Amino acid sequence: MIEFLGELAGWFADPATWSGRDGIPVRLWEHLWISGVSLAGSIGIGLPLGLAIGHTGRGAGTVVAVANIGRAVPSLGLMGLAFLLLLPLGLGVGPLPTIVALVALGIPPIVVNAYTGLREVDRDLIEAARGMGMREREVLRGVEVPIALPVILAGIRTSAVQIVATATLAAAIGGGTLGQLIVIGFNVGDQVRIFGGALVVAALSIATELGFAWIQRRATSPGLRGRGYAPIDPAPVAPGGGTPLP
Amino acid sequence: MRTNRTFVLGAALLALVISACTPGEGDSPAASAGGESQAADLPSLTIGSAGFWESAVVAEIYAQALEGAGFTVERSLELGARDVTHPALVDGEIDLMPEYIGGYLAVTYEGEPTPDIEESLTALRTELEADGLVAFEPTPGTDADGFAVRQETADDLGLATMSDLAEVAGDLTWGVAQECAENPNCGPGLERVYGIDFASLDVETLAACSTAIAEALNASNIDVAQVCTTQPEIAGFNLVLLEDDLGLAPAQNLVPVARQELVDEAGEVLETTLNEVSALLTTEELTNLGAAVILNGESYEDAASQWLEDNGL
């Protein structure tokens, strides 16, 4: 055990670990940009969808059901499918199949949380806003979204962590990422690299979690923060009541 | 190559259990084909194979050829990896199986195979002797790591050998295994033997010998793919396997490995029959046999009997 930790430290200390095609910096950067683009895609699709059904209440059953089915599809299977479908376009090898799969993976938590967050906003507040003459868009932007923001951001945070952790699989289909370190370790029978690679991915996932938690705290309106809300709790929050719903 | 074969181990063990529960092949119809005068003297034998298609279909070819020569043959195919098949040979659970010179020497005996067939085979035979085993003549065909291109690329650039490829290496997108940069038979080997500067190549990484890498090559996502030289998709997609003209890959030619006891009992007819088969198994023939069983779903029996018929055996 001690010996293994020594080898692990040796691996991290080795300059070769930090240089070249399969060095940590190159693969880390690849991991980050693929995750970033994927998260942006998930937000771009998931957020408008979640806000629309949350605001209107229409189509919610269908969308949430589809989103939940989406969670059940294995990401590796989706990557393999995207790989095969993109091959004829010359885009099968490289980051795109991974991005397609990660966008799909990231959408459900964002949709479900945006929807839930909006539906949990006190109906009286919305009626009051309408009574003051606010248009629907203004109600959404000025009342619903600010109040639901902690829950919406919690969805994005969940999505981000899942994407960062799952991007590792890209190495299996030519997408690179930090998973490359693990696959190489596996193929050459080097447990130090398997563990070292996994450690880097785990650290990145935790950093993502902490980073988004910080953003979430910062973005929560002081009015909500000061009244006993639990802003980083992804569970739906009961407006006015001050305690998270079960 | 090695990885996907070990995955077959589970299935192979299952097959073993099932085959152990079913009645033996008994008198095969092929036994009547020839050598009636010898039939009485010839011993019965059990043929085994490793847990993947190529070993199994070659073992089945051995079986049918030997039945044709008058032997009574039992089959115990797809046993698994060498940690299963080698003890089975040594202990006499099986008497004969196809093996790979380089892999057998490296994995079981921790030897160092070279691209030189004779040298590697001599080293293997020395090791086998101590275990009471005999290796006959090797096939011309080899199942080693290799590189393939599309037919059109080969035509356009005039590629037939790895030396040809080396001259245009920098203009092409390579698909190689993730660990290529540190596999002595891949990145460093390309550099040492063919003078290809691996670090400067345009490289995508996919599992070598996989269907995915063959698909990616066929769909022009990459221009060169690291393949196994007898990979069925080479035939399926009409890919061009480049000849390893300067000798990068260790010799992975197939040899029939038999127990010395069987060789003593069976006499010359065993050796001549198997050598006759081996001499015809080129890399291309092995690839076509793979295409028959993997891509066309033929049974080992059908593919083997068809092959023997086509080759007049």
Image (cartoon, helix red, strand yellow):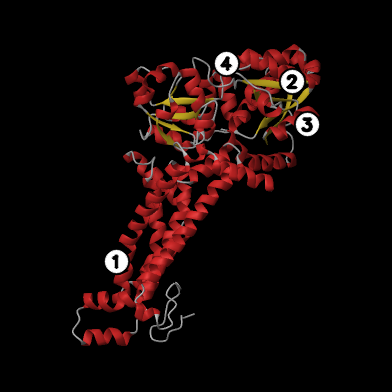
Q: Foreground residue, A14 or A206?
A: A14
Task: Residue B276 in the image: state x and y as whole percent.
Answer: 63, 14
Q: Foreground residue, A228 or A103?
A: A228
Q: Do the residues labelled 2 and 3 touch (CB within 8 Å)?
A: no
Task: Residue A125 in the image: state x and y as whole percent.
Answer: 30, 85
**Mark 1, residue position:** A48
Chain letter of disc 2 in the image: B
Residue type at numbered disc 1: Pro
Residue A125 horizontal side relative to residue B98, left or right: left
Q: Are marks 2 and 1 in contact (CB under 8 Å)?
A: no
- Dot 4 and dot 1 within a common chain: no
**Mark 4, residue position:** B140
Q: Distance between the residues labelled 4 and 3?
A: 28 Å
Q: Distance between the residues labelled 4 and 1?
A: 64 Å
- Tell me the element at label 4: loop
**Mark 2, residue position:** B127
- Dot 4 and dot 3 within a common chain: yes
At horizontal 36% and vertical 35% (from top left) the residue drawn is B221
At horizontal 37% and vertical 41% (from top left) the residue drawn is A92
In this view, the mark in front (2 or 3): 2
Task: Residue A69 in the image: state x and y as whole percent.
Answer: 44, 63
Residue type at numbered disc 4: Pro
Q: In this view, does B117 lie above or below B172?
A: above
**Mark 4 vs mark 2: which is more N-terminal?**
2
Residue A242 horizontal side relative to residue B37, left or right: left
Residue type at numbered disc 2: Glu
Mark 3: few, some, or many residues within 10 Å (few <14, many ≥20)? some
Q: In this view, does A66 lie above or below B277?
A: below
At horizontal 32% and vertical 65% (from top left) the residue drawn is A47
- Dot 4 and dot 2 within a common chain: yes
